[in-house]
Amino acid sequence: TQYLLMASQLLFVFLFSVSGGNELVQGPIFGSTDSTAVDAYNYYIGVMIMMIVGFGYLMTFMKNYGLGAVGFCLLVSAIGLQWGLFIEAFFYQMVNHTWGPVAINTYAILAVTSNIAAPLISLGGIIGKVTPLQLLIMVLLEFTAHSFNYNVLMNGILKVMDIGGTYSDHMFGCYFGLAVSYIIGAPAWW
């Protein structure tokens, strides 16, 4: 598992160095011309605390897996944030037929941080059933499917109004977690 995590980090370093851009424009998904970067950063900090601490301690209810819940939430958030920057920008550029460097700025990171809720909701359905390696694979696959779904719903043909990520984040994460739980089956000790 640690070798796959190291390989994924090397892949992310390569992606950041090759396709990342640091131009001072709004992010590919989310941005507001009315707010400053400091406002976006403060909002980002609040959302990340909710993702890591809120989801992590929410899942400590399980007797045998409570101590690992915060660690799993940190793993999902770290991998999801890095992978999400590139996969969200890829699908956004694909839907809008505009290709260019991936904007890596406060607004792009804030948009991806909000979307990390989907894999964390899925984690609630499979915690105690997966290894960190399976969790890493699930996060990469789920974020890819989530980004495609998000761009089809919000930016593509449908143009759905989704206040608070009800459809794109919460329902998607719930059903994806249930599907993964069904595919994995019961734990070996049952």
Image (spheres, rainbow, N blue to C red):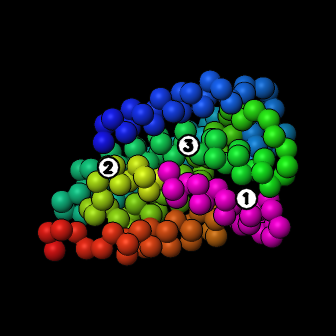
Give the class, few, some or many, for how many residues have Cα within 10 Å of label 1's Cα (few <14, many ≥20): many
Q: Look at the numbered disc 1 and give the secondary structure of its residue.
A: helix
Residue 190, disc: none
| Disc 1 from disc 3: Cα separation | 16 Å
Q: Which kind of residue does numbered mark 3 sit on?
A: Trp
Quarter of the picture holding the N terminus? top left
Q: Say which residue label 2 marks.
A: 132
Q: Give the overall secondary structure of the magenta segment.
A: helix
Residue wearing tag 3: 83
Q: Is residue 154 on the magenta stretch?
A: yes
> From the viewer's perspective, is 172 left or right of 121?
right
Locate the C terminus and report the quarter of the image it occupies: bottom left
Q: Residue at x 67, y 59 (%)?
A: 148
**Residue at point 38% right, 53% down?**
135
Image position, residue 96 (x, y; %): 84, 52
What amino acid is at disc 2?
A: Pro
Residue type highlighted by circle 1: Asn
Residue designated by label 1: 151
Tell me the CA gap for discs 2 and 3: 16 Å
